[in-house]
């Protein structure tokens, strides 16, 4: 646990009709929390249903008046809840997300009662979507590729899924204020309503959720062009670009102009090498201190060889735990992640393409978040010079495209 200090495990319970982005929200939230150093896990009841009952269930299975389907669905919901209860018992500071429709008051009351036995009051997260076009897009983009419809034709699958939604609609009881703490998201990114939300971690969760949206747009990440220190193999400092570095800036500019259909937000660090790189681009940059390279403290401007020979204990300690090792009077990777948190939220909020010109360690932290890598892997991710990394944030880690632009 780094900064999100709170008491005991937390359980979030998703609520809402099918195709309202519940799984998208659950997965994004868990990814964000894991990246923040909080152990978090999704328990998706649909996965238990597919595992225990097979994936191809027709819409009639979800009819609330179908006693066989009702009982089978209750069984898999309970199996997921049992696993969740075990998980929270072993993860006293964790956050579990129970991802199911939970559209009836009685189902939610059962969850609340069960969790009360271990002194946990769940927080419900309800997703409401008033825009039919968004529901339609969600069905087409995510539901048709589910194992449930592996053998079905798209039109038949869409019809079946709509019939499934209609069954849920008949028994849907939106959350009321007497049901405990909740967060209601209306048309993700448009409105947020809160009931009895208190405490640091719940507030952070609200802060994160209220900045999410579902408009896909690309994020381009790159290190600055080659700097004088890169040539000398020195860390940190505030060196200028070399001629090779300036060439890369020109090539990156051409490349980005081809790739961005609308003008992007352009962010750099406050260090000369990123500002000089972005000055070749036709957009106005914003220089952000949070994007500055990891602070190497007393080792700033040294080569790795100099650190090894002049501060061997420090060199060895970093080798042992690169994620948590903090340079004397400098930073660790965990420190960099902490200072990047507001930027991550801002990145989620942006609806235009975003171009970030930054540094190796900082980009490792951003790529770890965007591609769902563990904090432990983060300090070792490959972020070469003169390579543009393109990502589109999604519920499931988006495809990462890397383009090398010359030597
Ligand atoms: O070498 C370039 C650089 O950006 C340094 O300024 C920085 O200290 C380093 O990379 C971070 O990489 P690592 O954590 O692997 O030392």
Image (tube, rainbow, N blue to C red):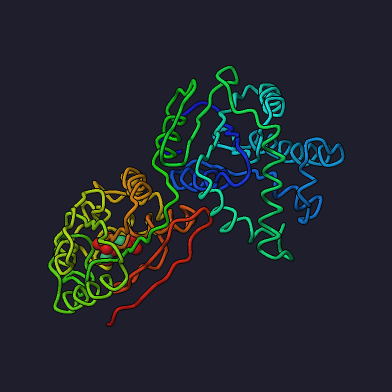
Position above or below: 407 against 273 = below
Position above or below: 49 against 183 = below
Position above or below: 359 against 109 = below
Residue at 53% over, 37% down: 128
Q: Can residue 122 be spotted in the picture? A: yes
Quarter the C terminus occupies: bottom left
Query: Between residues 304 and 386, which one lies in front from this camera angle?
Result: 386
Q: Quadrant of residue 168?
A: top right
**Which x, y percent locates residue 151?**
74, 66
Looking at the image, in which quadrant does ligand 1 appear? bottom left
**Which x, y percent locates residue 368?**
43, 57
Q: Quadrant of residue 305?
A: bottom left
Relative side of 224 to 148, left or right: left
Residue at 71% over, 47% down: 163
Relative side of 211 to 196, left or right: left
Query: Between residues 180 and 152, which one lies in front from this camera angle?
Result: 152
Residue at 66% over, 61% down: 155
Query: Between residues 312 and 292, which one lies in front from this camera angle?
Result: 292
Position above or below: 387 against 391 = below
Query: Between residues 87 and 155, which one lies in front from this camera angle?
Result: 155
**Which x, y percent locates residue 38?**
49, 41
């Amino acid at each position: 646990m780094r900064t999100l200090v709170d008491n005991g495990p937390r359980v979030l319970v998703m609520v809402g009709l099918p195709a309202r982005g519940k799984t998208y929200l659950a997965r994004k939230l868990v990814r964000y929390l894991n990246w923040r150093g909080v152990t978090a896990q999704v328990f998706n009841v649909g996965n238990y249903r597919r595992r225990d009952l097979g994936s191809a269930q027709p819409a009639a299975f979800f009819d609330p008046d179908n006693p066989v389907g009702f009982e089978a669905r209750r069984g898999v919901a309970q199996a997921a809840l049992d696993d969740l209860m075990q998980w929270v018992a072993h993860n006293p500071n964790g956050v579990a997300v129970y991802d199911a429709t939970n559209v009836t008051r009685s189902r939610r009351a059962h969850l609340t009662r069960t969790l009360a036995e271990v002194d946990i009051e769940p927080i419900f997260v309800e997703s409401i979507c008033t825009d039919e076009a968004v529901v339609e897009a969600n069905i087409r983009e995510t539901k048709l590729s589910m194992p449930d419809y592996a053998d079905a034709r798209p039109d038949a699958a869409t019809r079946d899924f709509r019939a499934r939604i209609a069954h849920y609609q008949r028994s849907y009881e939106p959350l009321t204020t007497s049901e405990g703490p909740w967060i209601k998201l209306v048309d993700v990114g448009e409105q947020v309503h809160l009931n009895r939300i208190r405490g640091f971690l719940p507030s952070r969760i609200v802060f994160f959720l209220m900045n999410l949206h579902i408009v896909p747009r690309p994020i381009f990440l790159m290190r600055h062009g080659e700097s004088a220190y890169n040539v000398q193999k020195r860390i940190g400092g505030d060196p200028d670009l070399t001629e090779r570095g300036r060439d890369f800036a020109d090539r990156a500019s051409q490349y980005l102009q081809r790739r961005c259909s609308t003008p992007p937000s352009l962010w750099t660090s406050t260090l000369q090498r990123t500002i000089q790189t972005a000055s070749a681009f036709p957009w106005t940059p914003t220089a952000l201190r949070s994007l500055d390279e990891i602070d190497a403290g007393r080792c700033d401007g040294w080569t790795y060889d100099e650190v090894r020979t002049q501060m061997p204990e420090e060199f060895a300690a970093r080798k042992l735990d690169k994620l948590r090792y903090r340079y004397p009077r400098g930073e660790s990777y965990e420190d960099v992640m902490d200072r990047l948190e507001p930027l991550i939220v801002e990145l989620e909020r942006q609806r235009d393409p975003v171009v970030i010109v930054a540094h190796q360690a900082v980009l490792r932290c951003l790529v770890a978040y965007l591609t769902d890598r563990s904090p432990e892997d983060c300090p070792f991710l490959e972020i070469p010079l003169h390579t543009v990394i393109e990502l589109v944030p999604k519920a499931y880690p988006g495809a990462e495209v890397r383009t090398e632009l010359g030597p």
